[in-house]
Image (cartoon, rainbow, N blue to C red):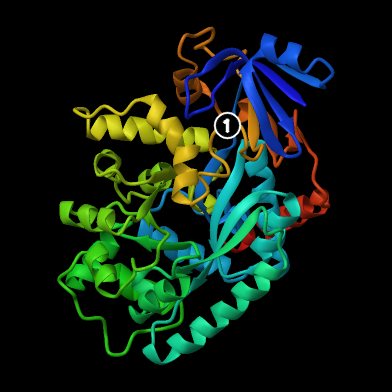
């Protein structure tokens, strides 16, 4: 199939005007000026995207996709209060509910141009839903234990799940990783054990330094948030938490959290200059979640400092219970505006922002040789945008037009491995999503009546 558009954005090379991409056997076989490729492949099926743009599929490095059912349920609350409420609501979700919720979330990802997703969960339902949809994904099995005596049990359970999940998915598209539970709900020995288990082959994610409450809890032990969350999750640490005097990053480092080869730090908002250098030394990547961080009052991650340090940075939409949508275009715009407002002297431009949403996210997930850019030999994870209604068109800077004006609604085609999974408002997936939509609607109604 030959895909032609007014603009082609390869990301790792300059944009092409009136360009085309040839897709064969699930991979990108050629890319160049449309006239040349039409002549070269005269018998190829052609699909036109007039006043449109072709680009690599978006890479959403962090989400909790199974919480899509909770969208709009918990609004206008600061992080600690929001977290407590989400924990209460999610406690009533069973495996079937989580599958339907993750499936609906995955459909939204496809419709908004996301072809590659990272999601943290304890439920196999998420793995099954994403695999059924045909998405490319890394699913991180979360593992936690507050009591040191339960660490062995927790790790054994996680290892068994990881082995079982991995045996049930398309290994060409999906990987299973591991993630320790957040600092405030996890014995530090878990960090060491998880990093050792991940080693040099398994992707690892760690939720760290995301909120001021977490920072104060780890450093000085004075955050009321920690006790509240512990009690509501059904455990209290004995002996009580003792302040470490260290930042969350330094605390986790001291327990060996960064010893694995492919570690992604989720949020990493409240960090010192020394923290950044330590993370750089261990080649820790960062999942930047600007909308979640701002909506919940968590703070603003120092992305320009991470970039100056040469670190890998990708974009994540985080929990749908916080951001309500999985719109990576909104993340790009929010992230760009926050960085410009807080670091005007470094003035982040649209080009590195689009890179974070594509090849940058692929680098964070260790998939830069597979996806993230339009290059010959890479998998054909491609999206098409309709820019006919954009206030920025026509333009000499299509990258800025996409970052500054595009939304999920502009996505008209989403392809994974050369297979079109979303096209002009319709999904081409082998699942009964109508049933899942009806199920989620009922669950939301039940939850709303309880809220």
Q: Residue at x 26, y 30 (%)?
A: 341
* In this picture, residue 417 sits left or right of residue 289: right
**Quadrant of res 43:** top right
Residue 435's x, y, as percent?
A: 82, 54
In this view, the residue farthest toward the bottom is 149
Residue 304's x, y, as percent?
A: 27, 38
Q: Where is mark 1, residue-wise?
A: 375
Q: Identify whether 431 is placed above or below 147.
A: above
Q: Identify whether 389 is placed above or below 291.
A: above
Q: Residue at x 55, y 48 (%)?
A: 72
Q: Identify whether 266 is placed above or below 228.
A: above
Residue 359's x, y, as percent?
A: 48, 38
* In this picture, residue 414 sits left or right of residue 219: right
Q: Quadrant of the C terminus?
A: bottom right
Does residue 326 show up?
A: yes
Q: Looking at this view, is 229 or 333 the one in front?
A: 333
Does residue 78 show up?
A: no
Q: Quadrant of the N terminus?
A: top right
Q: Residue at x 29, y 48 (%)?
A: 299
* In this picture, residue 243 sits left or right of residue 116: left
**Quadrant of res 387:** top right
Residue 164's x, y, as percent?
A: 67, 74
**Quadrant of res 417:** top right
Q: Residue at x 25, y 44 (%)?
A: 309
């Amino acid at each position: 199939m030959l895909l032609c558009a007014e603009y082609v954005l390869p990301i790792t090379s300059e944009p092409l005007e009136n360009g085309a991409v040839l897709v064969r056997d699930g991979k990108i076989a050629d890319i160049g000026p449309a006239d040349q490729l039409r002549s070269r492949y005269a018998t190829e099926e052609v699909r036109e995207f007039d006043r449109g743009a072709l680009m690599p599929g978006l890479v959403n490095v962090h989400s909790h996709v199974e919480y899509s059912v909770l969208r709009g349920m918990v609004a206008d609350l600061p992080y600690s209060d929001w977290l407590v409420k989400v924990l209460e609501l999610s406690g009533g979700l069973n495996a079937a509910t989580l599958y339907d919720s993750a499936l609906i979330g995955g459909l939204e990802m496809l419709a908004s141009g996301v072809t590659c997703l990272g999601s943290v969960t304890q439920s196999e339902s998420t793995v099954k839903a994403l695999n059924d949809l045909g998405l490319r994904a890394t699913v991180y099995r979360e593992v936690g234990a507050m009591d040191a005596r339960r660490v062995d049990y927790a790790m054994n359970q996680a290892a068994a799940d990881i082995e079982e999940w991995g045996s049930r998915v398309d290994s060409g598209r999906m990987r299973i990783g591991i993630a320790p539970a957040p600092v405030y709900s996890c014995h530090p020995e878990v960090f060491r054990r998880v990093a050792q288990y991940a080693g040099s082959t398994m992707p690892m994610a760690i939720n760290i330094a995301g909120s001021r409450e977490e920072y104060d809890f780890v450093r000085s032990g004075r955050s009321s948030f920690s006790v509240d969350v512990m009690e509501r999750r059904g455990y209290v640490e004995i002996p009580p938490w003792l302040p470490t005097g260290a930042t969350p990053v330094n605390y986790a480092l001291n327990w060996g959290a960064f010893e694995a080869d492919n570690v992604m730090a989720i949020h990493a908002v409240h960090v010192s200059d020394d923290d950044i250098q330590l993370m750089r030394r261990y080649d820790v990547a960062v999942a930047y979640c600007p909308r979640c961080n701002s909506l919940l009052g968590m703070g603003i991650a120092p992305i320009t400092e991470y970039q100056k340090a040469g670190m890998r940075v990708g974009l994540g939409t985080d929990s749908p219970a916080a951001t309500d949508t999985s719109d990576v275009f909104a993340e790009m715009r929010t992230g760009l505006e926050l960085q410009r407002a807080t670091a005007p002297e470094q003035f982040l431009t649209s080009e590195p922002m689009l890179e974070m949403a594509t090849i940058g996210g692929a680098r964070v997930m260790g998939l830069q040789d597979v996806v993230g850019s339009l290059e010959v030999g890479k998998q054909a994870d491609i999206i098409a945008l309709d820019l006919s209604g954009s206030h920025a068109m026509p333009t000499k800077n299509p990258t800025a037009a996409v970052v500054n004006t595009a939304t999920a609604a502009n996505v008209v085609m989403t392809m994974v491995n050369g297979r079109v999974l979303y096209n002009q408002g319709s999904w081409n997936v082998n699942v009964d999503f109508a049933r899942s939509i009806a199920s989620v609607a009922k669950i939301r109604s039940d939850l709303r009546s309880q809220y």
